[in-house]
Image: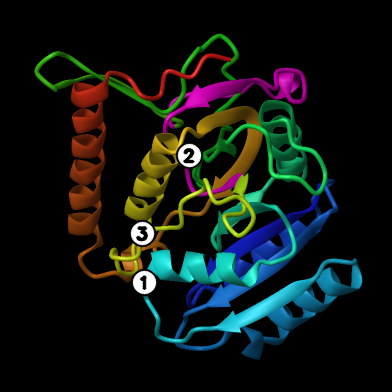
Amino acid sequence: MRVTIHLLTKDRPSELAMCLNSLYTQTFKNWDLILVDSGSTPVITYKFINDIIQRIRLSGHWVKYINKMGWCDIGKLRNIAIEEDIFNRTCLRIDDDSIADSEYLDRLVQCYIHYSGYKEGQVAEKLVAVGGVVPPCGSPKIYMPIPESGIFNEIKFDLDGNITYIADDGGYTYDPFLQGMCSVALPSHHLRSSFIFPNPTFDKRVPLYPEEYGQTGYREETDWCIAFAYAGGKMYTVTDAICWHAHGRSGGARIPNYQEIAQINDIHFREKIKRWYQERGNPFENKK
């Protein structure tokens, strides 16, 4: 299987360099890259970025750079990457401030093949998307694995629509002696930041990204996951596939009213999930 990595970047050359280097060192080698740049300064003007991209190309990976300076709608930018990706049937979306462990892509791919029934050159039998664990870079520990848990990223509501339970990827610590021994794919109703999914260019069951949310992420990510579930898709989180996320000054803090936007997005997410639970029961009942 060959995967196209869809990577959006905006004025974060240092973080982008770390992300690209983490992709370059992946144990899974069958990938290509589409880099969509909407920053005020093109990242390819930085020599160290050009050097990394050249190294990636010389290693046998196809790379396409797309300049969309000043275009801030993140959903539209993600769809541009999809529209340009006419070669591979599977995609990985990843943020430019992410640092993937060397086996991250390999573990996602193995899980994706297992659950989707993927066969080379064909649309996958089952509609599946697979993510990993996304701890913040500043954490001293890794949040995984959690093989005893039967759920991941789940919200539950009572009959009045009040939230009674939340399970997310922010509270599980990791024993380093277990690494590589506890790979477990847990059902999920929401994938975070970086995940593998079928390419909508080839698989028309897969939704494109919503395009009305401006430059902030998370909301388009939430709505995509909900639309994917509506289409019959199943989502899984691999507990020992880790992609660090460098939250901080250069992330959402670049937007003056980011905290206000984040709160609005969180309310949006909870209301959407609540409405679905009330109307249809638990749509994310996703037995292994």
- Callout 2: SS: loop
Which amino acid type is marked by label 2? Leu
Which amino acid type is marked by label 1? Asp
User: Is residue 158 depicted above or below 176 in this figure?
Assistant: above
Mark 1–mark 3 Cα distance, whole angstroms, equals 10 Å
Magenta residues span 170-196
Given residues 149 and 76, the one toward you in this image is 76
Which label lies toward us, 1 or 3? 3
- Which residue occupies 58% across, 26% down? 144
Mark 2–mark 1 Cα distance, whole angstroms, equals 20 Å
Residue 52 point in image, percent of width and height: 77, 74
Mark earlier in primary sequence (2, 3): 2
Q: Mark 3 sits on what residue?
A: 210
Residue 138 point in image, percent of width and height: 50, 46
Cβ atoms at labels 1 and 3 below 8 Å apart = no
Helix, strand or loop for the magenta stretch, by majority: loop
